[in-house]
Structures are given as C-alpha cells and as structure tokens.
Amino acid sequence: MYKPEGWTNRGTSANSLIRRSALATGKVAPSSNRDEAMTTTRLAVIGAGLIGREHCALACTHPRVVLAGIADTALEAEHYAGQLGVPFFSDFETLLDEIRPDGVIIALPNALHEKAGLCCLERGIPSLIEKPIADTISSAKSLVEKSEATDVPILVGHHRRHSPDIREARRIVRSGELGDLVAVNGMWMADKPEAYFDAEWRRRRGGGPVLINLIHDIDCLRHIVGEIESVRAIASNRTRGFDVEDTVSVALRFENGALGSFLISDAVASPFTWEHTSGQALYFPHQPGDCYYFGGREASLAVPSMTVWRHDGTDKNWQDPFVHQRVNLDGSGAYQNQIDHFLAVISGDATPVVSARDAMLSLAATLAIDVAAREDRIVTIREMIA
C-alpha cells in the first residue's frame, strides 16, 4: 500500500538490507535456514562485479535458492566466492558443464552477454541476463533467434517491471482508466560525482546517460504505454565537455498515437529519478516524489506516488477543480519480485515478463535516441531493427 513521506526501503526491511549488503561484500556466510521439504533451485552467477554480487546476495538469502557456483576472471571474485563457500570457476563454460545449474544469472560487461547467453541456450539452461540484453542489435537478434528456436527462456533484467508502481501504472493506463492516452512526460536528473568519470570509457561515446541510464526509463515507458514508433533528440555535453553527452531532451511518438517527452541529465542536483522517488533502488536514498506522468482524456497519473488526478464529475474542464487519490501498492520489492519471477520461469510456471525480443526493442529504442541526437533527425524503431 502507499506509504507517506519519509518511508524508506519500500518492501524491504532494514535488517534484510543490512544482511544483503554484508553478503554482497562477502562479510557474512549465506543463511542455511531453508525448509528441506521446500523445492530448491540451483542458480549460478556469471560475473561477480557490483550487480553480480547483489544477485549472489539475493540468492543466498532466498529460501528456495541454492547458489551453486560463481564464474569470473578476477582474483577478488574468487576470494568473494570462497567467503561465501560457493564453488568458483574462472571459465563460465566449465561452470555450466560441471555444475549444471537450473538457471544462470549473467552479470557480465554488455559485450559478453551474447556469448554467455548462447552458451546457456545451447545447454538448455534458462538465464537472467542483466540489461541491456546485448551491446548491439545484431547480438540481441542472435539471442532472440536462439531462444525462440530452442524454446529456452531468457529473462532480461529490466528490474523496474517487477516493481509494484510500474506494474500498477501499466494496469491503469492499459485498462483505460485515464481515458484515451494523449501525452507522457518523464525525467531522470541526477548528479554523478566527478570520480565516476575517472574510468575513461565513461567519457566516451556509449558511456553517457542515454545508454547507461535512459534504457531503464525507455523500457518502463514501452511497458506502460506501448511500442515507440519514432524518436527525435537533442544532446549536449556543455557541462563537462567530454565526448559523451551529459544532457539529452527526447521527443517520442508512440504507435498508439500518444506523444511523449523525456529529459535526462547526469549533471543536475536533483532527486527526480525513479531510483530516488520509488524507494526501490539499492544504493540511493528514498526521496518521495514523481518522475513519470501519464495524461489521458479523463484523468492523469503521476508515478511512483501513484496519484490519479481527475475532475469531480463530468463535463468539467481546466477551470474546474480537481480531486486526487493515491492508488494502493502491495509494498513488495522489485529485486525480490524479479528473482521470484525467474524461479517461476525456470520451473515453467511463467513466461518472462521481459523476454529477449522485448528487451531487444527497448535496446533498439534507446539506440535510436542516440542516433537521432547525433544525426539530428527523426529515427524510427523499425529502421533500427531492420
């Protein structure tokens, strides 16, 4: 349900966050209090970087999961696996062949997603691939075609779709409760620290907020509103002067006729991001507010506060007062919901909320924004996936 201002860590207790953080750093051993009568799923994690360790921590604290193995090339990852008491492999194909896990979480650099994903598909092992599905459309297509040909599922880690605010926003918009959808607006504005850019690749093309951050929001808008037909964008690097953009203004045309706009910047002191406003993010403080707005002929919706605004009665217009109500949410956590869903995908009880093909379209729309900004023209999604 909706909580008032000041509530933090939505759907996750402070104790569980502390324990999960400790597991992610290898400071405590995984819990062993599992019900032996409960069916357990053996998961492996390929890539033990920042997000990979979060997946390990979630697996270690889940009552129906056994973390069966970790694969990485870094020595510190081997130490981390040893602290957890989990088998470690420097080669992920060896892990797949020797451990034979029920499912695999792939948290490697984007350029390695295709190879690792194909290796899982060839062995009939369902995978959860961190977003984006791949670094290029051609690599994404390779995964889509193999997954559909083998009927082995891929779930892509666009975790926001598992958050109760995004799920409910999709239901409200698609059910017609707002009337015909006319307009969509969103923003992501944050202030990344200067040390963030010490890594050279973050100062070069591909390392900016469009491909790193905006893909999350584009996926949310596609999920809630529907497919994007075309985009136009203006980008600027004025603030830092790097080769890569720091601020981008985007115009979107959806296939259902709605128009949208989105403003993204990683150089603004602001809490106007989904990470801050939702209370769902792992590393950011909760600042209650909104970052998405959906406007229909009958009502409008602000997310993630889940505030619906409408006139009190019919035949009203802009000169008449509005009333508002907040939609109750279930208080669950996106990351916990995602791993629960992955278990259901592995068991065959669910189909992926974010399939390989679905994630490819989010990648295509995001890459289209990059092309539109660089070439100063309208770019269609069909052009990107042709």
Image (tube, rainbow, N blue to C red):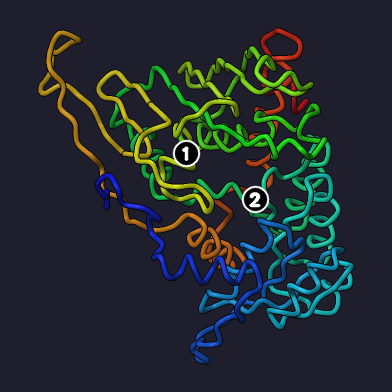
The reply, left or right, for residue 305 in relation to residue 24 is left
The reply, left or right, for residue 70 in relation to residue 311 is right
**Residue 223 rendering spot, x and y as whole percentages:** 51, 37
Q: Where on the picture, by quarter, is residue 32?
A: bottom right
Determine whether the residue tagged by mark 2 lies in a helix, strand or loop.
strand
Res 286 label:
none
| Quadrant housing the C terminus | top right
Against 374, residue 37 (above or below) is below
Against 42, residue 114 (above or below) is above
The residue tagged 2 is 156
What's the amino acid at mark 2?
Val
- Residue that sits furthest to the front in the current view: 194
**Residue 59 rendering spot, x and y as whole percentages:** 60, 71
State which tag comes first along the sequence, 1 or 2: 2
**Residue 363 rendering spot, x and y as whole percentages:** 69, 34
Mark 1: give few (<14), some (14-19) or many (20+) Cα within 10 Å: many
- Real-space CA distance between mark 1 and mark 2, rounded to the nearest whole angstrom: 19 Å
Res 274 label:
1
The reply, left or right, for residue 150 in relation to residue 272 is right
Rendered residue at 44%/22% (across/down): 185
What's the amino acid at mark 1?
Trp
In this view of the protein, which residue sits in the foreground, 167 or 1? 1
**Residue 339 rendering spot, x and y as whole percentages:** 55, 63
Against 43, residue 145 (above or below) is above
Mark 2: give few (<14), some (14-19) or many (20+) Cα within 10 Å: many
